[in-house]
Amino acid sequence: MGHRYGLNAQKCVSGKRCYETEMLAVEALIQHHIVNDYKGITGPINIYQCLDCGMWHFTSKGEKHALFDDEDTLSYIKKERRAYQWEKGIK
């Protein structure tokens, strides 16, 4: 993935991947849900700004991000997941 979704080349002292902005972290969170096809309440559900590094990270704890309540976003994730799985299956 490299810098594609604002992924910082370095990791935080927490060991988590760093995203430079809140927007990039949200985009990466959506992509993670497309690629990993998390079931139920597994996987990352929100983002937060780290007090140690100042960058943005995923979290699987706490309240889920509002994007998971948006029907358009959920539809987009579902559609892109199907396309990703189909593409992965033909390679």
Image (tube, rainbow, N blue to C red):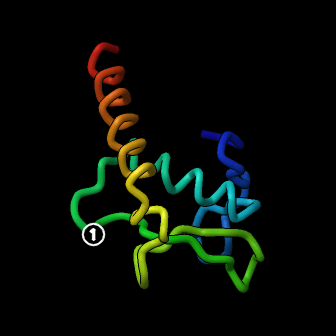
8 or 37, nearer to the observer: 37
Tell which residue pokes out farthest to the front in this image.
Answer: 71
In percent of width and height, residue 18 lies at 67, 62
7, above or below 50, in the image: above
Tell which residue pokes out farthest to the top in this image.
Answer: 90
Taking the image as shown, residue 59 lies to the left or right of residue 85, namely right
2, above or below 69, in the image: above
In percent of width and height, residue 24 lies at 67, 54
27, above or below 1, in the image: below
Q: Amino acid at mark 1?
A: Ile
Taking the image as shown, residue 7 lies to the left or right of residue 39, namely right
Name the residue: 42% across, 84% down.
Answer: 62
Tell which residue pokes out farthest to the left in this image.
Answer: 40
Residue count near mark 1 (Cα–Cα under 10 Å), binned few <14, some 14–19, many ≥20: few
> Mark 1 highlights which residue?
41
86 or 1, nearer to the observer: 86
Name the residue: 41% across, 63% down.
Answer: 68
In percent of width and height, residue 51 lies at 72, 85
Task: Give the quadrant of the C terminus.
Answer: top left
Name the residue: 59% across, 59% down.
Answer: 26
Taking the image as shown, residue 35 lies to the left or right of residue 58, namely left
Quadrant of the rendered image containing residue 79: top left
How many numbered marks are there? 1
Task: Give the quadrant of the N terminus.
Answer: top right
Taking the image as shown, residue 31 lies to the left or right of residue 55, namely left
Quadrant of the rendered image containing residue 41: bottom left
Please tell me whether mark 1 sits on a helix, a strand or a loop.
loop
In percent of width and height, residue 78 lies at 33, 42
